[in-house]
Image: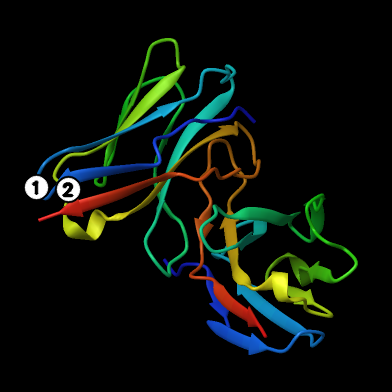
Amino acid sequence: EAGVAQSPRYKIIEKRQSVAFWCNPISGHATLYWYQQILGQGPKLLIQFQNNGVVDDSQLPKDRFSAERLKGVDSTLKIQPAKLEDSAVYLCASSSGRHGSALFFGSGTQLSVL
Amino acid sequence: DAKTTQPTSMDCAEGRAANLPCNHSTISGNEYVYWYRQIHSQGPQYIIHGLKNNETNEMASLIITEDRKSSTLILPHATLRDTAVYYCIVRMEYGNKLVFGAGTILRVKS
């Protein structure tokens, strides 16, 4: 079974530029999550989708971050404009959403904002 | 979601069992205990989860106390590749997010 795919693996941009990350979840998984992990900390949830609807985006900085999940499969996370403090690893995870189901994570995109 | 308390770091000798404790004294009846680990430069990896009973899979065993206020993750024969940050997370039963703490840094030494 293929895992969660993310791209790119690394990205370096200058502050005030825009950037986008892509995620392809495990086939059939209805729930998709984007997490931000700053160096030395545990991952923090940014947004959770159930199919193509947003379930939780309370921690998403909506003035600069946006995310969508077209057709309830792939998802993109965008930052525009980027700030220095956005330097982090952006992790995508998916789960079936069924009773007691685990989340499975991709390898993440490491973003450096200079 | 209930909060968890884990030691900041632990050391374990290669080939020995690694026992990682977790306190979750405010856990409620419909919350599961999940364990993940994160090896450097990788995404978190699912290990095991349980509700009330002890659980075992090919990676580890999970021992949950009868009052469910604490649990222990056991790696029966630790190897150098088990060096990682281990997260204990309490999660609601249905389709809810995982809230990560700081975790325990496990160092397996030869």
Q: Quadrant of residue B103?
A: top left
Residue at mark 1: chain: B
> Residue A85 at what x, y percent from top left?
71, 70
Q: Secondary structure at mark 1?
A: loop
Q: Between A88 and A70, which is closer to the camera in this rendering?
A: A88
Task: Say which label, 2 or 1, has the lower sequence index.
Answer: 1
User: Which residue is pictured at 78% across the width and 52% down the height?
Assistant: A59
Q: Between B45 and B21, which is closer to the camera in this rendering?
A: B21
- Mark 1 Cα shell of 10 Å, populated few (<14), some (14-19), many (≥20): some
Question: Label 2 is placed on what type of residue?
Answer: Ala
| Dots 2 and 1 on the same chain | yes
Name the image quarter holding the N terminus of chain B.
Answer: top right
Q: Is residue B4 above or below residue B96?
A: above
Asked whether the beta carbons under mark 2 and mark 1 sit within 8 Å of each other, the answer is: yes
User: Which residue is pictured at 50% across the width and 56% down the height?
Assistant: A104
Kindly identify which residue carries mark 1.
Answer: B15
Question: Label 1 is placed on what type of residue?
Answer: Gly
The answer for how far apart the CA atoms under marks 2 and 1 are is 5 Å
Q: Is residue B26 above or below residue B48?
A: above
Kindly identify which residue carries mark 2.
Answer: B78
Question: Does residue A103 appear anywhere in the picture?
Answer: yes
- Mark 2 Cα shell of 10 Å, populated few (<14), some (14-19), many (≥20): many
Q: Secondary structure at mark 2?
A: loop
Residue at mark 2: chain: B
Q: Is residue A48 left or right of residue B102?
A: right
> Residue B67 at what x, y percent from top left?
44, 10
> Residue A19 at what x, y percent from top left?
74, 84
Question: Does residue A28 appear anywhere in the picture?
Answer: no
